[in-house]
Image: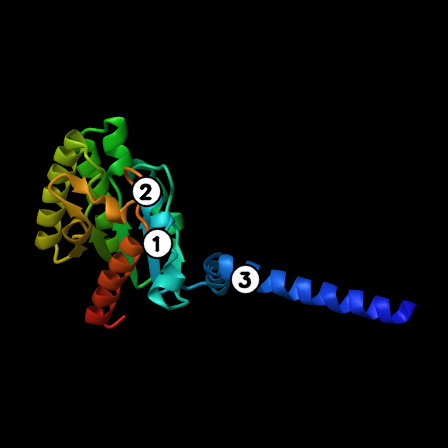
Amino acid sequence: MKIKRLLTFSLALNILLIGAGIIFSYVYRDKILQRFVSLKGNPTIVMYGNSITAQGKWVELLGRTDVVNNALPGMSTYHFLQLVQTHVIDLHPKICFVKGGTNDITVGVSQEKLQANYRAILEKLLQNHIVPVVTLTLYEQNDPVSKKEVDELNHFLVQFCKEHHITYIDLNAFVSDSTGLKAEYAVDKTHLNEMAYRIWAREIAAVLKQKGI
């Protein structure tokens, strides 16, 4: 009888542990896959940006295991520029999706400095034979001051991209309106929900297909 109870307890414990392992693997599947990609090295794609990029589950969203999310939450384009060598160039990817500017605008960085940083980042990628793709800076919700700054930055980015034959993604066309980021695509004033990330991933996948990557 005692042996039977021990066997029952052992079976129940094993089932519980297996169940917990499955749940953990499901919840943290993108982080686990990201770790695998990092260990494997030589990613094809690097995602580079601030917290909006960082929160994307890109392995899952893009359905591929050659993408590294090296975004820098809370950082500005100055930090992106300082770290682009280690976070992007040294990994030798084929393509890098870049998105930033929101944090710069929030803390009052001038357009002159912001645009200069962005220009330097993109030029470094081109010089190192990495294909840059710019996701234009997103609007925040109901913030006309920020929106004006975003419009000025995006105007510069579109012109720069056209002059240097760089592809850009205008995510605002899908998730924003005249007042800024739509509530249906937001989790707060600035950040995106899963619906918005699926739209963004769709646009990225279209770019990858176009470039044969």
Q: Position of residue 156 (x, y in %)?
A: 11, 42
Q: Residue furthest top?
A: 108
Q: Are marks 3 and 2 in contact (CB under 8 Å)?
A: no
- Residue type at mark 1 is Ile
Q: Are marks 3 and 1 in contact (CB under 8 Å)?
A: no
Residue tagged 2: 80
In this rendering, the count of numbered labels is: 3
Image quadrant where residue 17 sits: bottom right
Q: Is residue 54 visible?
A: yes
Viewer-side label of 1, 2 = 2
Q: Which residue is mark 1?
A: 89
Q: Is residue 139 above or below residue 106?
A: below
Q: Amino acid at mark 2?
A: Phe
| Mark nearer the viewer, 3 or 1 | 3
Quadrant containing the C terminus is bottom left
Label 3 sits on a secondary structure element that is helix
Query: Where does residue 37 sit, x and y in percent of width and height?
Result: 46, 63
Outermost residue, right side: 2
Q: Which mark is residue 25?
A: 3
Residue 28 visible, this angle: no
Q: Tell me which residue sits at (40%, 62%) in the image.
A: 59
Q: Secondary structure at mark 2?
A: helix
Residue type at mark 3 is: Ser
Residue occupying the point 50% across, 63% down:
36
User: How far is disc 3 from disc 2 in space, using C-alphas?
Assistant: 31 Å
x 16%, y 38%: residue? 150
Spatial separation of the CA atoms under disc 1 and disc 2 = 12 Å
Q: Earlier in the sequence, mark 1 or mark 2?
A: 2
